[in-house]
Image (tube, grey):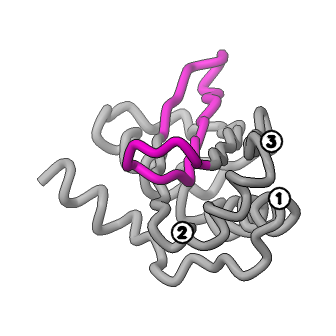
Amino acid sequence: MTEKYKILGTFIKDMSSETKDSETYIFVKENISKYQLEINITSKAIKNKLIEVNTILKFEDKKESKHKSYFEMTYATIVQIDEDIKDKKELEKIILCDVQIEIYPEIEKTLLNLLHNSGFPRIKFEKKVDFENLYKKKFN
């Protein structure tokens, strides 16, 4: 392995779109600009320097409302870590930053497809996620 890690595979672990009725759909269609994207990243060791990284994306309105839709996706990435990687900080950066930068364009496209297929075809994510900057903010 020439890199510090290698992505062996990716898959959608879970995907959900919930809009309970027509009234909710109409309300959400008019108010979806208030929805926010939240990203959570978890990981667990599988075996022999293999790690499952789960990137969880939620797109929802944070305000309490009777009418709201809910969209969530868990995207799993199987990562093989180079034998030479021993430092916990270096491993954290690989999982939280490097892998995310590599997989995020596909994850974003998949979530947008879910939103479009759920009846919200005009949704776009204008702000790009800067995983380098987020990582630096969290650990520096």
Horizontal side, residue 81 vs residue 121: left or right: left
| As drawn, 90 above or below 36 | above
Name the residue: 83% across, 59% down. 118
Q: Assign a secondary structure to mark 1.
A: loop
- Above or below, 7 against 127 in this view is above
What percent of the width, then of the height, locates residue 96?
43, 48
Which residue, given by chain and number where applicable, does mark 1 sit on?
Answer: 118
How far separated are the C-alphas under marks 3 and 1? 17 Å
The C terminus - image quarter: bottom left
Q: How crowded is mark 1: few (under 14 residues within 10 Å), some or many (20 or more)?
A: some
Q: What stretch is highlighted in magenta?
A: 41-68
Q: Which residue is drawn at the image coordinates 47% and 49% (left, top)?
A: 39
Give the spatial CA distance, label 3 vs label 2: 28 Å
Q: Residue 82 carries which label?
A: none
In three-dimensional space, the C-alpha distance between marks 1 and 2, rounded to whole angstroms, equals 15 Å
Residue picked out by circle 3:
12
Q: Hey, what amino acid is under mark 2?
A: Asn
- Answer left or right for 49 relative to 22: left
The residue that mark 2 highlights is 31
Give the percent coordinates (x, y) of residue 9: 81, 44
Foreground: disc 3 or disc 2: 2
Given residues 55 and 3, the one toward you in this image is: 55
Q: Residue furthest right?
A: 117
Q: Is mark 2 on a helix, strand or loop?
A: helix
